[in-house]
Image (cartoon, coloured by chain):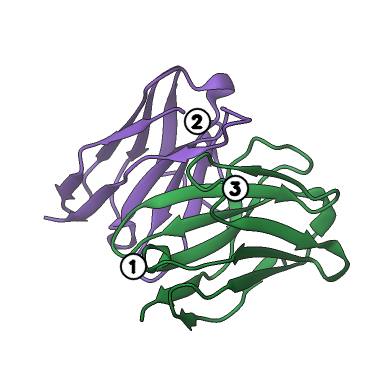
Chain colours: A purple, B green
Amino acid sequence: EIVLTQSPGTLSLSPGERATLSCRASQSVSSSYLAWYQQKPGQAPRLLIYGASSRATGIPDRFSGSGSGTDFTLTISRLEPEDFAVYYCQQYGSSPRGSTFGPGTKVDIK
Amino acid sequence: EVQLVQSGAEVKKPGESLKISCKGSGYSFTSYWIGWVRQMPGKGLEWMGIIYPGDSDTRYSPSFQGQVTISADKSISTAYLQWSSLKASDTAMYYCARLISPHMIAGAFDYWGQGTLVTVSS
Protein backbone atom coordinates (compact mmCIF):
# COMPACT_ATOMS: atom_id res chain seq x y z
CA GLU A 1 0.00 0.00 0.00
CA ILE A 2 1.24 3.48 -0.85
CA VAL A 3 1.55 5.65 2.27
CA LEU A 4 1.20 9.41 1.88
CA THR A 5 2.87 11.89 4.23
CA GLN A 6 1.77 15.53 4.31
CA SER A 7 3.74 18.43 5.67
CA PRO A 8 3.50 20.57 7.57
CA GLY A 9 0.78 19.31 9.86
CA THR A 10 -0.41 22.87 10.43
CA LEU A 11 0.38 25.99 8.46
CA SER A 12 -0.37 29.33 10.08
CA LEU A 13 -0.60 32.16 7.57
CA SER A 14 -2.34 35.48 6.99
CA PRO A 15 -4.81 36.30 4.21
CA GLY A 16 -2.94 37.33 1.08
CA GLU A 17 0.07 35.11 1.82
CA ARG A 18 1.20 32.18 -0.29
CA ALA A 19 0.64 28.64 1.01
CA THR A 20 2.79 25.70 -0.04
CA LEU A 21 1.62 22.24 1.03
CA SER A 22 3.64 19.07 0.48
CA CYS A 23 2.54 15.48 -0.11
CA ARG A 24 5.15 12.73 -0.29
CA ALA A 25 4.44 9.13 -1.31
CA SER A 26 6.23 6.02 -0.04
CA GLN A 27 6.58 4.84 -3.66
CA SER A 28 6.04 6.34 -7.05
CA VAL A 29 2.46 7.31 -7.86
CA SER A 30 1.62 5.95 -11.30
CA SER A 31 0.51 8.33 -14.04
CA SER A 32 0.50 11.22 -11.55
CA TYR A 33 -2.75 9.89 -10.10
CA LEU A 34 -2.64 12.40 -7.27
CA ALA A 35 -5.52 14.58 -6.11
CA TRP A 36 -5.99 17.36 -3.57
CA TYR A 37 -9.14 18.09 -1.56
CA GLN A 38 -10.24 20.90 0.72
CA GLN A 39 -12.46 20.21 3.71
CA LYS A 40 -14.08 22.79 5.96
CA PRO A 41 -15.67 21.93 9.32
CA GLY A 42 -19.02 20.20 8.96
CA GLN A 43 -18.68 19.87 5.19
CA ALA A 44 -17.85 17.11 2.75
CA PRO A 45 -14.45 17.32 1.05
CA ARG A 46 -14.23 19.27 -2.21
CA LEU A 47 -12.00 18.21 -5.10
CA LEU A 48 -9.46 20.90 -6.01
CA ILE A 49 -6.82 19.18 -8.17
CA TYR A 50 -6.62 15.84 -9.96
CA GLY A 51 -3.93 14.27 -12.12
CA ALA A 52 -1.45 16.19 -9.95
CA SER A 53 -2.01 19.50 -11.76
CA SER A 54 -5.48 19.73 -13.33
CA ARG A 55 -7.93 22.03 -11.58
CA ALA A 56 -11.39 20.62 -10.99
CA THR A 57 -14.44 22.43 -12.34
CA GLY A 58 -15.04 25.78 -10.70
CA ILE A 59 -11.79 25.89 -8.73
CA PRO A 60 -10.14 29.35 -8.73
CA ASP A 61 -6.78 29.65 -10.45
CA ARG A 62 -5.06 30.67 -7.21
CA PHE A 63 -4.98 26.90 -6.53
CA SER A 64 -2.31 24.99 -8.43
CA GLY A 65 -0.80 21.54 -8.19
CA SER A 66 2.57 20.23 -9.29
CA GLY A 67 4.91 17.30 -8.90
CA SER A 68 5.41 13.73 -10.06
CA GLY A 69 6.78 10.44 -8.83
CA THR A 70 6.82 10.67 -5.06
CA ASP A 71 6.74 14.44 -4.41
CA PHE A 72 3.72 16.65 -4.96
CA THR A 73 2.82 20.21 -4.01
CA LEU A 74 -0.37 22.21 -3.66
CA THR A 75 0.14 25.96 -3.87
CA ILE A 76 -2.40 28.62 -2.98
CA SER A 77 -0.98 31.78 -4.48
CA ARG A 78 -2.81 34.30 -2.27
CA LEU A 79 -4.91 33.06 0.61
CA GLU A 80 -8.49 34.24 0.75
CA PRO A 81 -10.47 34.07 4.03
CA GLU A 82 -12.46 31.10 2.70
CA ASP A 83 -9.26 29.07 2.05
CA PHE A 84 -8.57 28.36 5.72
CA ALA A 85 -9.39 24.67 5.95
CA VAL A 86 -7.84 21.21 6.01
CA TYR A 87 -6.25 19.91 2.80
CA TYR A 88 -5.83 16.25 1.94
CA CYS A 89 -3.87 14.59 -0.84
CA GLN A 90 -4.99 11.27 -2.30
CA GLN A 91 -3.28 8.80 -4.59
CA TYR A 92 -5.52 6.65 -6.74
CA GLY A 93 -3.14 4.77 -9.03
CA SER A 94 -2.41 1.66 -7.02
CA SER A 95 -5.32 -0.50 -8.13
CA PRO A 96 -6.16 -3.26 -7.23
CA ARG A 97 -5.10 -2.29 -3.71
CA GLY A 98 -7.11 0.84 -4.12
CA SER A 99 -6.44 4.34 -3.02
CA THR A 100 -5.12 6.14 0.05
CA PHE A 101 -5.37 9.61 1.56
CA GLY A 102 -2.71 11.58 3.36
CA PRO A 103 -3.25 12.67 6.98
CA GLY A 104 -4.03 16.27 6.03
CA THR A 105 -2.57 19.75 6.47
CA LYS A 106 -4.54 22.34 8.38
CA VAL A 107 -4.19 25.89 7.10
CA ASP A 108 -5.22 28.29 9.82
CA ILE A 109 -5.23 32.02 10.33
CA LYS A 110 -2.10 33.48 11.90
CA GLU B 1 -26.98 18.71 -11.83
CA VAL B 2 -25.05 15.80 -10.36
CA GLN B 3 -26.18 14.95 -6.83
CA LEU B 4 -25.42 12.23 -4.33
CA VAL B 5 -27.92 12.16 -1.48
CA GLN B 6 -27.19 9.97 1.51
CA SER B 7 -29.51 8.50 4.09
CA GLY B 8 -29.86 10.11 7.50
CA ALA B 9 -27.90 9.75 10.71
CA GLU B 10 -28.08 6.45 12.57
CA VAL B 11 -27.66 5.52 16.24
CA LYS B 12 -27.07 1.82 16.80
CA LYS B 13 -25.92 -0.57 19.50
CA PRO B 14 -22.84 -2.80 19.21
CA GLY B 15 -23.67 -6.03 17.42
CA GLU B 16 -26.53 -4.56 15.40
CA SER B 17 -26.59 -4.52 11.61
CA LEU B 18 -26.87 -1.43 9.43
CA LYS B 19 -27.20 -0.48 5.78
CA ILE B 20 -26.77 3.14 4.67
CA SER B 21 -27.51 4.45 1.21
CA CYS B 22 -26.36 6.93 -1.41
CA LYS B 23 -28.71 7.87 -4.25
CA GLY B 24 -27.21 9.35 -7.39
CA SER B 25 -28.99 11.63 -9.85
CA GLY B 26 -28.17 13.96 -12.72
CA TYR B 27 -25.81 11.56 -14.49
CA SER B 28 -25.56 8.01 -15.83
CA PHE B 29 -25.39 6.11 -12.53
CA THR B 30 -24.26 2.87 -14.15
CA SER B 31 -21.26 4.45 -15.88
CA TYR B 32 -19.27 5.83 -12.94
CA TRP B 33 -17.57 4.05 -10.05
CA ILE B 34 -18.86 5.17 -6.63
CA GLY B 35 -16.75 4.97 -3.51
CA TRP B 36 -17.15 5.15 0.25
CA VAL B 37 -14.90 7.16 2.56
CA ARG B 38 -14.78 7.00 6.36
CA GLN B 39 -13.94 9.92 8.63
CA MET B 40 -13.70 9.09 12.30
CA PRO B 41 -14.37 11.93 14.77
CA GLY B 42 -11.65 14.56 14.47
CA LYS B 43 -9.61 12.41 12.09
CA GLY B 44 -8.70 12.22 8.41
CA LEU B 45 -10.22 10.55 5.38
CA GLU B 46 -9.99 6.80 4.76
CA TRP B 47 -10.75 5.17 1.40
CA MET B 48 -12.94 2.14 2.04
CA GLY B 49 -13.81 0.77 -1.38
CA ILE B 50 -15.58 1.35 -4.67
CA ILE B 51 -18.29 -0.21 -6.78
CA TYR B 52 -19.19 -0.01 -10.45
CA PRO B 53 -23.00 -0.02 -10.49
CA GLY B 54 -23.10 -1.17 -14.11
CA ASP B 55 -22.00 -4.69 -13.17
CA SER B 56 -21.48 -4.47 -9.36
CA ASP B 57 -17.72 -5.03 -9.67
CA THR B 58 -16.42 -4.09 -6.21
CA ARG B 59 -12.97 -3.40 -4.78
CA TYR B 60 -12.10 -2.95 -1.11
CA SER B 61 -9.25 -1.41 0.79
CA PRO B 62 -7.37 -4.18 2.61
CA SER B 63 -8.25 -2.34 5.85
CA PHE B 64 -11.98 -2.73 5.22
CA GLN B 65 -12.15 -6.06 3.38
CA GLY B 66 -14.40 -8.39 5.35
CA GLN B 67 -15.53 -5.60 7.68
CA VAL B 68 -18.16 -4.00 5.43
CA THR B 69 -20.10 -4.82 2.28
CA ILE B 70 -20.55 -2.41 -0.61
CA SER B 71 -23.40 -2.99 -3.01
CA ALA B 72 -25.57 -1.16 -5.52
CA ASP B 73 -29.05 -1.35 -7.02
CA LYS B 74 -28.81 0.22 -10.46
CA SER B 75 -32.57 0.11 -10.93
CA ILE B 76 -32.92 2.84 -8.30
CA SER B 77 -29.49 4.48 -8.78
CA THR B 78 -28.45 3.73 -5.21
CA ALA B 79 -25.25 2.47 -3.64
CA TYR B 80 -25.07 0.95 -0.18
CA LEU B 81 -22.62 0.38 2.65
CA GLN B 82 -23.52 -2.22 5.20
CA TRP B 83 -22.33 -3.83 8.40
CA SER B 84 -23.48 -7.16 9.81
CA SER B 85 -22.27 -6.51 13.35
CA LEU B 86 -21.37 -2.97 14.34
CA LYS B 87 -18.62 -2.06 16.79
CA ALA B 88 -18.12 1.13 18.75
CA SER B 89 -15.07 1.79 16.56
CA ASP B 90 -17.40 2.06 13.53
CA THR B 91 -18.60 5.41 14.89
CA ALA B 92 -17.77 7.87 12.12
CA MET B 93 -19.05 10.02 9.30
CA TYR B 94 -19.35 8.05 6.07
CA TYR B 95 -19.28 9.75 2.69
CA CYS B 96 -20.11 8.38 -0.71
CA ALA B 97 -18.45 9.99 -3.70
CA ARG B 98 -18.32 9.57 -7.46
CA LEU B 99 -15.15 8.92 -9.44
CA ILE B 100 -14.43 11.66 -11.91
CA SER B 101 -14.27 9.74 -15.21
CA PRO B 102 -16.85 7.32 -16.62
CA HIS B 103 -15.87 3.64 -16.57
CA MET B 104 -12.40 4.32 -15.14
CA ILE B 105 -11.51 2.54 -11.90
CA ALA B 106 -8.67 4.93 -11.05
CA GLY B 107 -9.88 8.39 -10.32
CA ALA B 108 -10.37 11.25 -7.92
CA PHE B 109 -13.77 11.84 -6.32
CA ASP B 110 -15.46 14.81 -7.98
CA TYR B 111 -18.93 14.75 -6.38
CA TRP B 112 -19.60 13.88 -2.77
CA GLY B 113 -22.66 13.07 -0.72
CA GLN B 114 -23.43 15.12 2.38
CA GLY B 115 -22.29 12.33 4.68
CA THR B 116 -24.07 9.91 7.02
CA LEU B 117 -23.12 10.01 10.69
CA VAL B 118 -23.13 6.57 12.27
CA THR B 119 -22.96 6.40 16.06
CA VAL B 120 -22.49 3.03 17.73
CA SER B 121 -22.95 3.08 21.48
CA SER B 122 -24.37 0.84 24.14
* Helix, strand or loop for disc 3: strand
* Helix, strand or loop for disc 1: loop
The residue that disc 2 covers is: A52
Q: Where, quadrant-wise, is the C terminus of chain B in this rendering? A: bottom left
Q: In the image, what residue occupies the spot 41% across and 59% down?
A: B39
Q: In this view, does B66 lie to the left or right of B99?
A: left
Task: From the image, state whether disc 2 or disc 1 is nearer to you.
Answer: 1
Image quadrant where residue B103 sits: top right
Q: In the image, what residue occupies the spot 41% across and 76% down?
A: B119
* Helix, strand or loop for disc 2: loop
Picture coordinates of residue A51 (x, y %)? 56, 31
Image quadrant where residue A72 sits: top left
Picture coordinates of residue A23 (x, y %)? 34, 31
Indicate whether B114 appears above or below A7: below
The residue that disc 1 covers is: A41
Both on one chain, marks 2 and 3?
no
Point out the residue furthest to the right here: B75
In the picture, the disc for residue B49 is 3
Q: Which residue type does callout 3 highlight?
A: Gly
Kindly report the distance in space between the C-alpha atoms of the residues bearing marks 3 and 1: 24 Å
